[in-house]
Amino acid sequence: MVRDLRFLFLLLFILIACSSRRAVNDPVLETGVDRSLALYRKAVLSNIGYALELDIPAGQTKAISAHETLTFSLNSVRLPVQLDFKEDPAKISMMIINGQHVDVNYQKEHLLLGPGFLKMGLNVVQIEFTAGDGALNRNLDYLYTLFVPDRARTVFPCFDQPDLKAIYTLTLHVPQDWEAIANGELKDSVIGQQYKTYHFKPSNLLSTYHFAFAAGNFRLYKGIAGGKTTDFLYRETDKTKITPSLPAIFALHSSALKYYESWTGIPYPFQKFGFVAIPDFQFGGMEHPGAIQYKASSLFLDTGATKDQLNSRNNLIAHETAHMWFGDMVTMDWFSDVWMKEVFANFMADKSAEETAGKDAYALKFLIDHLPAAYAVDRTEGANPIRQPLDNLKDAGSLYGNIIYHKAPVMMQQLESLMGKAPFQQGVREYLHKFANGNASWPDLIQILDRYTPADLEQWNKVWVNESGRPVISYTVTYEDEKITRLQIIQRPEYGQKRIWPQTFELSLFYPGSVKVLHASFTGEKLVVKGAEGLARPMFILFNSAGDGYGQWPVDPLLLQQLFSLEKPLHRATACISLYEQMLSGRVIRPDELLALFGRGLEREQEELNIKLLTNYISTIYWQFSTPAQRKRLSAGLENQIWAALQQQKASNNRKQLFKAYQDIFMSAGARDRLYQVWKSQQPPSGVALAEDDYTSLALSLAVRDDADPAILKIQDSRITNPDRKKRFEFIMPAVSGDQGKRDNFFNSLKFLPNRARESNVLGALYYLHHPLRQAYSIRYLQQSLDLLEEIQSTGDIFFPQSWLQATFGTYQTKQAADVVRKFLAAHPGYNSKLRAKILQNSDNLFRAERLIKEVYE
């Protein structure tokens, strides 16, 4: 009976959650793609097909002429059909509906197809137009499309919503020496006098944001991935990166394909497999079937690549390949569930790594990849739930962030642990088979998974998925005769109303020569750990010792002296993360004390991932939680500490990580001279391998400190041979200049959309523009940066608003900077709620630094 009642409650939850999908009212006519419009079109449209022909000239300023034949079946002609086109309607030169020429009726970013020209059943619409440039990412000698989440409508008229999948037949006319790739297989290519024409076969069923192509001056490499002949387009010219990277890239794709085919029980679900490496791509990757896009610098690594870089490449390839099943074959029906495709891609990428890396290595990587990034958002007052409401697709980009990419995988791991690996896999397989080539929602998946577990998924879903925040965990322990009589662990919400996070975790009790591991499970506010009763008093207790629990974990003060004596890298990492989180809350340890502890740890830590974790924390504490006066006192000692640790390390990658940390924090003249000589002679310290990108980074680090060599940037510019990297460097140079007027001009240039087109370059420049050593001057840009945020959200790609804020506010610490944020929020009470949340997320460390510096040091 309990099970039956619980099932009825779950069914009610699913019906409520899905009710909007069935409530079809007349659509609203407004900008963007409103939910009412999406529901109506899904109810009346089917069998959609796009035949697109584009004439793409060389260069990036000439117009792209285009022809589109749109076909669709219609089961109601009562209302106009709204076709999305976020462009100047004057770009449409001809429109024919079912053989009749019609005048363009354009309202609020929609072409209205009048009922008088439509018919029940098959309809054919032909459009001659000039393609919009909004998402074509045009460069001098190449371009690529990027339509996620709703930007296909900025290029061609379409039904731009994820649950109206269609077949795309693409023809491209491009300059003769260009290569091209698209979703569909290449049917043929015809070379003319000046142009080459690519005819691609009809694609599989795709959502508009999955439709993609790239064309330009790329190199074409044909290889084998997963037993399939695979095209790879790239522009990299450095043979020291190309030679080791090409076989690794194809091997990683092959391994990922094999794993997902086996785990899902479904063969690769699309007609072709291919990918393209894009210089300065906005994201790490984008999962277009048959034409995956990657950031080139993430794929092409030299032999000196660090473990972190290699892991990132492995993860990226596994993530995008997982999307072929999770997101592409089965797609969310609305972007409120965009997190579903991302959590599965990240979670499955992690699972595939577990197969090859082993349990301990997997656990360490999972912990470091996800927990710090998730906490960075979830600890803030702007924290958002994993699943967020969405009324209009024009706001869909604001849903993306660390919660869906990093908290959600932790949630999914907890769900798998709750259900058991085999039942979880069975449920997911059923979900994939049921919704293959279609669309589904999170409640659809939960309804299936519920049949495979007796657990209360309704309550679990409520706190993990539909609510924001994390638990703050504390404990009490009592002893009698040096034995534990009671160990109680308590959880409470960091913010908001009382909630319970159901989760499993481990705690370890450390004794001389042994460790006692206890498994625990939170089902309520308090947990008495029965397995601890009667055990001898330990030297210290480590909470979340397996790294798979979620929350602000307590730190046993007795652990501090033993931290870097812990045998397992996983134990050291989870302890460091917990210490950092406690420091941010003003408990257990002060920022200067933690900086000293982590600095000493560099001398003993041998695990590369942990060195990366420590150096990241050291950088944050040094630049954001230490005043300029403190930094002057600390810098020489910290420099010597890092350099000594570098000399003691045997592994080349560890030495390189420490060299980068030294480059990040150096202040003294002696350190400057040492680094300058490395840059000038291009002779790195013994055991450290540096490539062109490393010397470029070093030149920028020297220049932002107003280096005595005024020619350093010009010389470095002359050393860069790859044209794409050269353009990036030249874009960033004014932001690093010691001339304040040049920096002002650079910032003012960002107010114009064309100058923000290469978002990756903009973010690189903002890092130096707002470098802590420049903040006394650059603080004047903060108000204007906030004023631009709404425009950036409406014109930029999905991660740009978040990244803009992070690059701008990421290292500020003063009351003056915090007041800028406070005054802005107070002056805009009706501000976009999702953007307001992102401001709070990215200024959280600023507010904490302001408070901690005042409380601890003043």
Image (spheres, grey):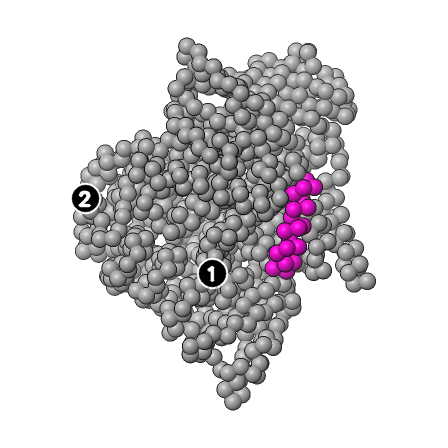
Tell me the mark number nearer the camera, choosing from 1 and 2: 1
Q: Residue at x 62, y 67 (%)?
A: 522
Mark 2 — residue?
A: 680
Label drawn at residue 360? 1
- Residue 775 in sight here: no
Question: Quick one: which residue is furthest to the front in this view?
Answer: 227
For label 2, the SS is: helix
For label 1, the SS is: helix
**Between 518 and 87, the one nearer to me in the picture:** 518
Q: Residue at x 48, y 32 (%)?
A: 230
Q: Position of residue 542 (x, y in %)?
A: 48, 71
Q: Label 2: few (<14), some or many (≥20) within 10 Å? A: few
The answer to whether 610 appears left or right of 710 in the picture is: right
Q: Which residues are magenta?
A: 417-435
Q: Residue at x 49, y 49 (%)?
A: 839
Asked whether residue 424 is drawn in magenta, I would say yes
Calculate the distance from the C-alpha at mark 1 to the C-alpha at mark 2.
42 Å
- Earlier residue among tags 1 and 2: 1
Label 2 sits on what residue type? Answer: Lys
Relative to 152, is 659 above or below?
below
Relative to 635, is 192 above or below?
above
The quarter of the picture where residue 118 lies is: top right
The answer to whether 668 appears left or right of 545 in the picture is: left
> For the C terminus, which image quadrant?
bottom left
- Contact between marks 1 and 2 (CB within 8 A): the answer is no
- Residue 62 in sight here: yes
Q: Position of residue 517 (x, y in %)?
A: 52, 72
Label 1 sits on what residue type? Answer: Asp
Asked whether residue 607 is drawn in magenta, I would say no
Q: Label 1: few (<14), some or many (≥20) within 10 Å? A: some
